[in-house]
Image (cartoon, rainbow, N blue to C red):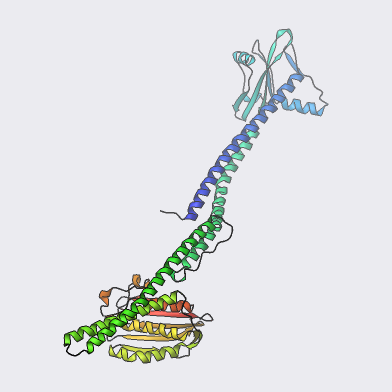
Amino acid sequence: MILTLRTRMAVISILVFGLLLGGMSVVSYRVLASRVDADVTARLNHLTDGLHGYLQVDGDVPSLDFDPNDGEQAAFIHEATRYYQLYDTATGRLLVQSDGFAPLSFLLTPAEVQAFGDDPKLLDLETDYGRIRISNTVIPGSGGRKFLLQVGVSLAPTDTVMRRYRDLLLWRVPAAFLIAALAVWWFSGIALAPLGHMAEAARALDVRALQDRLPTRGVHDELDVLAQAFNDTLQRLEQAVGEMRQFSAALAHELRTPLTALRGEIELALRTSGIDEVQKTAFVSQIEEIDRLKRLIDQILTLARAESGQIPLTFSAVDLGGLAASLVDQLEPVAQARSIELRYEGSDTTVVNGDEGWLRRLLLNLIDNALKFTSPGGHVIVRVGHEAAQARIEVADTGIGMSPGVTQQAFERFFRADPARSPATEGAGLGLSLVKWIVDRHHGTIAVASQPDEGSTFSVTFPAGSV
């Protein structure tokens, strides 16, 4: 599955943010744990060193020499002696044990006393009351005697703090991840909004309006560079298409003179006496083909001039209903000759501001196209009306119809449906292209609804106030 650019940006940003957040959470936890552990150790060393100054050993009887009336000294002694005990390193005998140590059942053997006396070090003890960190230091006594002093502090408060901080991280990371996902999705939409606007502007471009360009924001960022590159391509394309239009117009113009001369020579040959019927038939056929080529050339010239902006339009009030009714009256004999019913449906006057000559040509092309593709016995209906402040023209027929793929290309230049389905029709596929140009110049819209063997309906609308 191919993800959209916005989704890819969001996924990558969220993954990077998740890795950074997770990594920073682990690092912050470890740093905090290290700092807290160092603070506990420093506090324990402070208690141990201070207790050395107050502890006196007279024979086998230790005592604490401090002023009980001094609140600061009393508080220090109370904290330092909460967990403490004293051993004679020579015999391994326990001389004194605090009430805090007694429930822990932590007693050293003579060998352990000797070992800690030779190598004093910190000891973390797991108990039913939580962890306790114990310091081991040696106090010299009289007569060369040595005593092992053990002072402890509880690690339960720091363990509780670290556990709560860890739980907070475990809850914070998913919540932050979710918030970040929503924020990244929103910000990526804002960041890509100019690209969406550029895509909309690009979709609005048309080969008939290559002078249009994509808008730039003037901030000279990557999107402006992309828009400018696209505009440069449009400029080259406009130049190439313009040259092609000039070539087709020039070619069509140059072909008109020799075709006219050729038609005149054939007409003269046709009037010559002594030709048989076979030759006459051939000459008549040649004249018809020349006339067809001339009509094609005229259509090419008209379309080339129209698309190059050489044909000015004169706008005035035009009654579409009256225009359509008169065209139907004019073309009714043609429809009757083909056994096709042609009728007009419309009641109210529908007036628009447009070029009457080109609107007449629009209607004529649509009706002529409907008659071409409608079999004898069918009917063509021309409807004119207005709804929601819009003028609307519909030309519906019961002809051969078009498939959905064909309707999307119906207004392209030189496009024709499958000739096998309409072998008797003439034309080069330029009529509907010209119709589309007329509609665009009148700021209208045109659409076609069609089904094979069920007919087609061409609908043209002109917005009020813009036609």
286 shown above or below 218: below
Task: Return the residue nearer the eye: 71 or 409.
Answer: 409
Residue at the spot 47% in from the left edge and 70% down from the top edge: 209
Q: Which residue is at 44% across, 77% downward?
A: 306
**Residue placed most toward the observer, 99 or 243:** 243
Which quadrant of the structure image shows residue 264?
bottom left
Residue 445 placed where, x, y %?
Answer: 45, 77
Q: In this view, does 134 lie above or below 315?
A: above
Residue 246: percent from left, percent from top: 41, 72
Q: Residue at x 34, y 81 (%)?
A: 369
Residue 411 in sight here: no
Q: Is residue 425 left or right of residue 225?
A: left
In the rendered view, does 465 fall on the left or right side of 328? Answer: right
Can residue 205 be seen in the rendering of this structure? yes
As displayed, is residue 40 above or below residue 258?
A: above
Q: Nearer the viewer, residue 366 or 173?
A: 366
Please state the horizontal and vertical placement of residue 415, each as a whole percent of the image: 34, 72
209 shown above or below 227: below
